[in-house]
Image: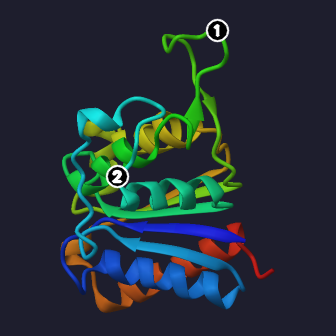
Amino acid sequence: MKISVILGHPRPGSFNHAIARTAVETLRKNGHQVFFHDLYSESFDPLLPAGEIPRNASLDPVVSRHCEEVSRAEGIIIVHPNWWGQPPAVLKGWVDRVIRPGAAYEFLEGDSGEGVPHGLLKARAALVFNTADTPPEREARVFGDPLETIWKNCIFGLCGVTKFYRRTFSVIVTSTLEERREWLSEVESAVSRYFPAS
């Protein structure tokens, strides 16, 4: 299977990097082809220019490659920290530029854009791994877990990916080495469950 793995964290050596590395290694061990992008290290430009908005716009070659990879992917894994209940700006910009009409969704004939999009992504499943410094009880009680809504409903559900798994690891700032090892084992297990050896 072709699996797209997208990492959005600015600091090399972060636990997000360890999660992404574990996911990529597990996928390769299971015999899958991996499209891996560390958006910060690749200096992905998150700004959506006006000229890219139309469906048939001429795209930057980097964006075009991302669109092609994600549209061909049979699975997608996203890794990022929870910042203000949202992905980091570079990842939000990746969504703006790559999860676009014609690549990830379309409006049905006769619909001028005011209706419900039809998903085009071929991915059998999407996995999202987050890190946070907010305890999960407080996240749910006070903030309502907006990342679940963003990724499950607003992005992947809209684009046709119905099998969805998300796991938040917290509290990162006070976590022990042993906890982090256990969490990485969880990542490996989840990746193998959704994308087993071929």
Residue 128's spot in the image, x, y percent?
48, 59
Point out which mark residue 94 bears: 2
Residue of label 1: 110
Indicate the quadrant where residue 149 lies. Answer: top left
* Residue type beneath disc 1: Gly
* Residue type beneath disc 2: Trp
Front tag of 1 and 2: 1
Quarter of the rendering occupied by the C terminus: bottom right
Disc 1 element: loop
In this rendering, the answer to whether 149 lies above or below 186 is above
Q: Residue furthest front?
A: 58
**Which mark is first along the chain, 2 or 1?**
2
Q: Is residue 77 visible?
A: yes
Left or right for 19, reference 13:
right
Point out which mark residue 143 bears: none
Camera-side residue: 174 or 124? Answer: 124
Residue 170's spot in the image, x, y percent?
31, 66
Q: Residue furthest right?
A: 198
In this rendering, the answer to whether 116 lies above or below 123 is above
Left or right for 89, reference 188:
left
Residue drawn where x is 49% and y is 10% of the image = 114
Q: How is the image coloured?
A: rainbow
Mark 1 Cα shell of 10 Å, populated few (<14), some (14-19), many (≥20): few
